[in-house]
Amino acid sequence: MAQYELLLPKMGESVAEATVIKWVKQPGDSIELDDTILEIATDKVDSEVPSPVAGKLVKQLFAADEVAQVGDVIAIIETEGGDISKDETPVVEKPVAEEKTETIPGIEQLPIANQPAATTDFSTSERFYSPLVKSIAAQENISIAELDAIKGSGADGRLNKDDLLDYIARKNGDVVKTATVIITPPVPPVNEVAAHKTEATNQAPIANKPSTTSVNGADEIIEMDRMRKLIADHMVMSKTTSPHVTSFVEADVTNMVLWRNKVKNSFEKRENEKITFTPIFVEAVAKAIKDFPMINVSVNGTQIIKKGNINIGMAAALPSGNLIVPVIRNADQLNLVGLTKAVNDLAGRARNSKLKPDETQGGTFTLTNVGSFGNVMGTPIINQPQVAILAVGAIKKKPAVLETEHGDVIAIRHMMFLSLSYDHRVVDGSLGGMFVRRVADYLEGWDLNREI
């Protein structure tokens, strides 16, 4: 019998680690080829890890809720054969031998850190170390004897990245533990109270302390799930990173609504897809971005990075109430049929937790449809590191004034609000206002006779 080391596979260019959600197979269970071994989570996407071999699960090296790095051995599978084998899934696709730096005129280049080669000999240790732990140890010149002495918090005492970083911080004196001492001040005499009050008014204000929430017997305490914690952290980070400004435009989308009502049945019969308003919004946004490319940027310190591709994320609500943002890549290169298929495919797989990690990465602009909840407008939070996000509200029939050659008239029109939140560090009111106005212009100017 042979033992096969199952590695955490590479799941995308920017994905370096994953959290174990649960083990589908337990030690002793028989495994067929492509059977799901465990479920993992990367950022917002839940994925399944299938087995590339048939055999029996011998050992789980990570417990539920533990974080594993790409390339870590996560399980041992016993297979037919005579030698110990390893998962041959490629982890690093590009050699590190030569790196070419492309100089962008007029832009200060981003710093590239030099990675020292690992020199520590790990063959003398019987303890397992992940490639990431080995790399950190080599960079910090930590000997194998010193590494073996560090207590690990992982499964079976495994040493993970956080254990090693904590050890390095303590070793370098970066972590100082302080004890909190509570001192009860003496009660001042009554005749000193007035003097203390007068003095306190002249002192600097005391920093606000976190508020304490009162809980009574009728309240229910609900612990945030993993995705909600990630969303909460991301939203707080965005608000502290970017000064948010929101501009609003009301658009007359009557022609767009009438056109969709006219073609939706024939389109569904021909393409076996339902056409919604979302791909129409995406098309208008992509066109407006080509008109105003400086809305399609990100910020790195004092550098503005102008994106070469138009990758539009569309916020989708999950049955759990959480939010996920799959990305339509190169949206400007797709026609309306292609956008419809992409929108329906991503939305469907998002609801069923079937998205791949790469499909939520690399967005350059985000669209959110608050109208799907009956809201007429919203002030969305920017999806960092992007600099703008567009919210489209519900389409409502309203009386509106129309200018005709015979004078102004009042008519029933299909109206909607568009609201653009943008990063005021790099997007001024003129750019933000003109961009959202241009999106509205594309929607208002919809051709009733357009062929699809």
Image (cartoon, helix red, strand yellow):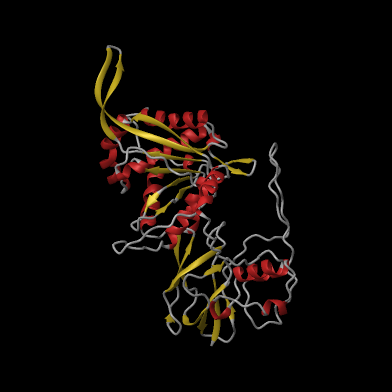
The front one of 331 and 389 is 389
Task: Tell me where residue 200 appears, x and y as whole percent.
Answer: 55, 46
Q: Quadrant of the C terminus?
A: top left
Residue at the outermost front position: 191
In this rendering, would 139 be left or right of 309? right
The front one of 204 and 372 is 204
Task: Tell me where residue 39 appears, x and y as whole percent.
Answer: 44, 69
Task: Tell me where residue 226 appears, x and y as whole percent.
Answer: 44, 62
Work out whether 364 lies above or below 113.
above
Work out whether 443 lies above or below 4.
above
Q: Is residue 153 visible?
A: yes
In this rendering, would 74 be left or right of 355? right
In this rendering, would 166 be left or right of 139? left
In this rendering, would 389 be left or right of 3? left
Q: Is residue 135 visible?
A: no
Task: Tell me where residue 334 appears, x and y as whole percent.
Answer: 45, 42
Work out whether 36 lies above or below 265.
below
Work out whether 281 lies above or below 16.
above
Residue 229 falls in which quadrant of the image?
Answer: bottom left
The front one of 129 and 231 is 231
The front one of 225 and 139 is 225
- Give the residue displayed 48% in from the left and 70% down from the top: 65
Numbered marks: total: 0
Residue 397 falls in which quadrant of the image?
Answer: top left
Residue 353 falls in which quadrant of the image?
Answer: bottom left
